[in-house]
Amino acid sequence: MSNNGISRRQFLQWGAMTTGVVVLAACAPSGAPSSAPAAGSEGAAPAAAPTTVQYWFAWGNLDPAMAKIVETEEFKAHMGGATLEYKASADEQSILTAIAAGTPPDGGSNYSYVNFYTRGATIDVKDMAEASTVLKADDMLEGIWNSAFYQGGMIGVPGIECFNWWGLNVNANTAEQDGLDATTLPKTWDEVLEWHKAMTKKDDAGNLLTFGLDPYDAMAGEPDFLAASYGVKWFDEETGAFDLANPRFAEGMDTLGEFIRIAGPDQFAGMRQVEGNGGWGAAYNAGIQNMIIEGYWHPGETQIQQPEVAQYNRSGWAPVPADRKDANIMATGLHAVVIFKDAKNKEGAFKLGEFFQTPTALNTIFDEVGWIHGVKSWLSTIDKNKYPGLAFYVDAGPEVTEWTIGRRCPINSFVVTQYTELREQVFRDLIDPQAAADELQKRAEAEWQAQGLG
Amino acid sequence: MAVSAPPAQRRGMTKTEKRNQVMGLLFISPWLIGFLLFALFPLAASLYYSMTNYDFIREPQFIGAANYVRLFTTDPDFWTVMYNTLYYVGIGVPLGIAVAFLIANLLNSEIKGRTLFRSVIYIPSIVPTVCAAMVWLFILNVQYGAINGILKTMGLATIPFLSSPELAKPSLIMIYIWAQGTAVVIFLASLQDVPRSLYDAALVDGANAWNRFWNVTVPLCTPVILFNFIMGIIAAFQDFTLPFVLTGGGPMKSTEFYVVNLYRNAFVQFSIGKASAMAWILFLIILLFSVILFRTSARWVYYGGEK
């Protein structure tokens, strides 16, 4: 008897084949953009410019400002109708993965700029910057403009938050309670150490209650700061040479280590663990830590997070050794919109960078997040007393005697990791400071060679 | 008379067999494609990357065994993290197994509230590690921890469980042991499989509680002890979340375990080639430990009363 129907076996066979084809089709690369003209078609219009700009930001702080910026008519007009696809808290792992997959966003900010640029992940924007009518070099603080360049190329469009990085912030209230004169902040390490001793309190059993300064907290935690404080240039970006074994660098590790010896290394380590191993400022906000070396953002962020502490914030010059007491050190560094090599809409990303120079963007970011970008014409318009301590940073520029442009070494992360371990060995008295500096130099040079940068 | 068997005739597959083979392959193709794309290819790629200078961004440059040589000879962290990891695995896993086995024995006895105890012991295994880490942070922290809070109120010096290089690793081992709920459950199942008749026979022979435990319970549970040992070693060698969240590898790299350092190399220092080499070295170490355990298991693992 013939059977003209479909058997169960045939049904399963065809079903499997159909599923296989569907799976393969789903795995295949997507087709050409719909805006692309069909091959061979005559008189087809040229492909339209991408109508979206993908922008990733490494942290989450910018969200409230971005939410307001994208709604402004000025922004919409500047972007020519392009839609911004903004992604916050897209950390370095995410962007690395996207780069490796060949699908990075168009622009990004707050990443390891020099790392990405020297490895070719982001493009040189010098030509675009020169052609721009919005971006004005002479209206930007010189150090910030210079920080955007690396070996002649331009890493990105400076913006969002580029301003002064180093200042000693003091809780004047606790200082006065401890019998210190908060109208004149300490300037040398010796003076700061005396304040630290006065502010460090322990109970009868030796448990730490409050302390003065963690000299390795926040912006002071990187080798840039220690080196600048002691007048050392630890990395020469032109030659790729390291000077971490400099005796003054070793001296600095010993001096700063003394702060931690006084309070107790284990107590400090415990404090940092509660803060989240690398988080900044929580101990200051909690009133446990009474001095912190931080950037211009500290007054604004403290005001937003802990106004009852922020009202007592006073800011002054970051400490230097006594033999350099006339040195006013300051750092700045890049935050920028960088454009990725495989970006689909490079022009769109550049336009976004341009928009961050406008008063609308600058005001919104300042009001919503407390961040500043060093555009001279705009700086003169802001209320420098809006946050206690901010005036120091705004007025500091002309009095700075030694500028540092931070985080310029392509293996900065590696050096920071090794420096963190070795300085801890120093303040735990497990290694001689000079031996630690020598070891740091050796490790940095070896890594430089191993990464093929030598 | 011996008759030799006729030589086996080789024949090709019939049409039906071929079609069935194709259909079989089609049916397993989703798994096959997934395995090739998401398991085999990454494995092969990581082996290749381990022999390159690769940073995720630039094209990988083949450098042979240089990453391996560098790790064993000049890398500043490799031997430190290896020591930390072996310390953690070497002490944590056997202790964890012993504690889990003892707890399982207690929970296997006729005690009041046994079900409750079983649940309580298992809960740590289902709590996300990050949450558990945060809880332990506020139990053990030197300034704000619950234990040290009590010590402070008593006027005693605090104990830097997690912030002293000497105490940090033992503290993490303690937390590791606390989270042995899964091993306890597996041991419980194993204990319930031990034949009652063997205990009865031992009683008749005059064996006391310890003798019954040592000569009946332990031998009959050795296959499960072996299983838990191997799974424990594999997991402990790859422990990441707990040290990363709790101590960040500190103080002074005393809790920088192998996989934490591997991650740091890959995603902080952009050394994907070196990180891949570390991954393969770890694979070989785990393989070595597993082989040693299997090879020696004939001496101490009893299957059905026989070695």
Image (cartoon, rainbow, N blue to C red):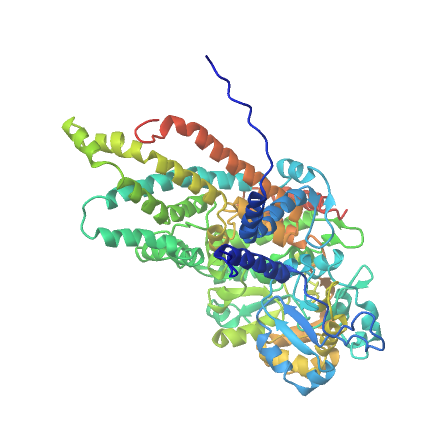
Visible in this render: residue A319? Answer: no
Q: Position of residue A356 (x, y in %)?
A: 70, 77
Q: Is residue A123 left or right of residue A418?
A: right
Q: Position of residue A440 (x, y in %)?
A: 65, 45
Please, is residue A364 above or below residue B92 in the view?
below
The one of A140 and B294 positioned closer to us in this rendering: B294
**How many dots with numbers?**
0
Which residue reaches farthest front? Answer: A1
Left or right for A197, reference A254 = left
| The image quarter in which residue A388 lies | bottom right
Task: Report the residue at 71% width, 59% height from top.
Answer: A116
Q: Nearer the viewer, residue B163 or B82?
A: B82
Q: Is residue B44 visible?
A: yes
The extreme bottom residue here reads: A73
Q: Residue at x 78, y 66 (%)?
A: A146
Q: Please tell me in which quadrant of the rendered image residue A19 appears.
A: bottom right
Residue B21 location (% of width, % of height): 56, 45
Q: Quadrant of residue B47?
A: top right
- Residue at the spot x=82%, y=73% of the render? A41
Quick check: A188 above or below B213? below
B68 over B247 or under it: above or below: above
Image spot of residue B176 (x, y percent)? 40, 47
